[in-house]
Image: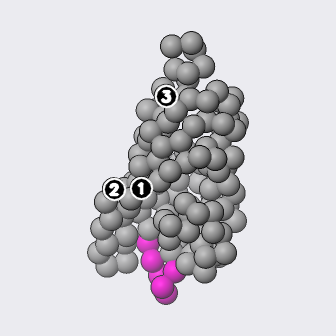
Amino acid sequence: MEEAWSAYDHDTVRQLVSPNLIEHTHHTGGGKGIEFAIQANEGVRSAFPDASKTIEHLFAEGDRVLVHIRMRGTNQGGLPWFGIPANRAKVDTQWISIYRVEDDRVAEHWTQMDVAGMMQQLQAAGSGE
């Protein structure tokens, strides 16, 4: 799943995720449906086209999978949903994703990202520091 997200392989993502996915990710506004999640992932590609993601930890129990991810990249496309223009700032951020699986497909997704840390890295470059 994470490899498909990182490769922007949305055909594979569609096979692994319920079309009625419930997205609980607050920094993207939350939403319902796989197309919402794909749109958010495309926003990452637009903002950080050189993004490199690594899985730091992976745990599974019952119907839940927890993934700790680290992403490094350069803000080349801006983050309009946060009001941040492209500024070539280097970003090193992390997040935790939790997936709930139902009938062998991801039915729900929660993410907690270090948005404050990422914003500091992005705004520091824009302020001349």
Q: Is residue 108 among what the camera can see? A: no
Residue pictured at 49% horizontal, 65% vertical: 2
- What secondary structure do most residues of the magenta stretch adopt? strand
Residue 90 placement, left or right of 19? left
Q: In the rendered image, which residue does mark 3 sit on?
A: 121
Is the residue under label 1 in contact with that under label 2 (CB below 8 Å)? yes
Q: Viewer-proximal residue, 110 or 41? A: 41
Label 2 to label 1: alpha-carbon separation:
6 Å
User: What kind of element bears circle 1?
Assistant: strand
Residue 2 in the image: above or below residue 71: below
Which numbered circle lies on residue 56?
Answer: 2
Foreground tag (3 vs 1): 1
Residue pictured at 52% horizontal, 20% vertical: 124
Q: In the rendered image, which residue does mark 1 sit on?
A: 54
Q: Amino acid at mark 2?
A: Glu
What percent of the width, then of the height, locates residue 5? Answer: 56, 63
Residue 119 in the image: above or below residue 92: above
Q: Earlier in the sequence, mark 3 or mark 1?
A: 1
- The region drawn magenta spans 100-105
Q: Amino acid at mark 3?
A: Gln
Q: Earlier in the sequence, mark 2 or mark 3?
A: 2
What percent of the width, then of the height, locates residue 24? Answer: 52, 57
List the single residue furthest toward the bottom: 103
The answer to if 55 sits in the magenta stretch is no
